[in-house]
Amino acid sequence: MKNGNQLAVGQASRLSLIKRRRHLPHYQLAAGYYFITFATHGRLLLQSSHKDCVFNAICFLDSKKYELYTAVVLNDHVHMVVNPIETLPKIMHSIKSFTAHEINKMLKRNGKVWQNESYDGIIRNEDEFLEKLNYIANNPIKENLARHYEDYKWLYIKGWRTGDL
């Protein structure tokens, strides 16, 4: 909804007006499951050590900022399904800020690691929830990163793998 040069944006159950047009609307319900995708800046390719960092950070925040159902760290993007405890902006800031700092240290550089925006969508029903889990499980196979989802190191699906969090 445009209002002059302002865009109405929902943030954590309240609407606010901001002047920057680049931000996508992010609406968060009081309870619910979310499918979240975020990508590297300039499609920076994540090396194994970078993927370890991102995957470990996502797993570390389970039960602190969200209940984690599934996550996959791919070469240049990440998918997650969570039930938030914190607001989505706080969740994304925690993950992106920490991992960007760590990845930049590994690369001995400064600069952006992640795109400013992320995609988040509410999962409306059980069929959509299962579809997102299946999509995430098959993503490494589709990207030719593994032959079977069990073989991919940076994939977590609650209840599907031994050594669950």
Image (spheres, rainbow, N blue to C red):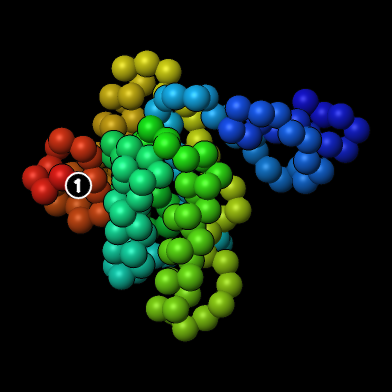
**Label 1 Cα crowd, 10 Å radius (few <14 / some 14-19 / many 20+):** few
Compared across the picture, whether 98 is left or right of 7 comes to left
User: Image point 45% across, 63% down: which residue?
Assistant: 98
For the N terminus, give its image quadrant.
top right
Looking at the rendering, which quadrant does residue 18 occupy? top right
Kindly tell me whether residue 28 is visible in this rendering. Answer: yes
Name above or below for residue 139 compared with residue 29. below
Residue extending farthest to the bottom is: 108
Q: Amino acid at mark 1?
A: Leu
User: Image point 47% across, 55% down: which residue?
Assistant: 94
Name above or below for residue 140 compared with residue 5. below
Closest to the observer, 83 or 72? 83
Compared across the picture, whether 117 is left or right of 95 comes to right
| Residue under pointer 1 | 165
Compared across the picture, whether 140 is left or right of 124 comes to left
Residue 45 percent location from the top left of the image: 42, 65
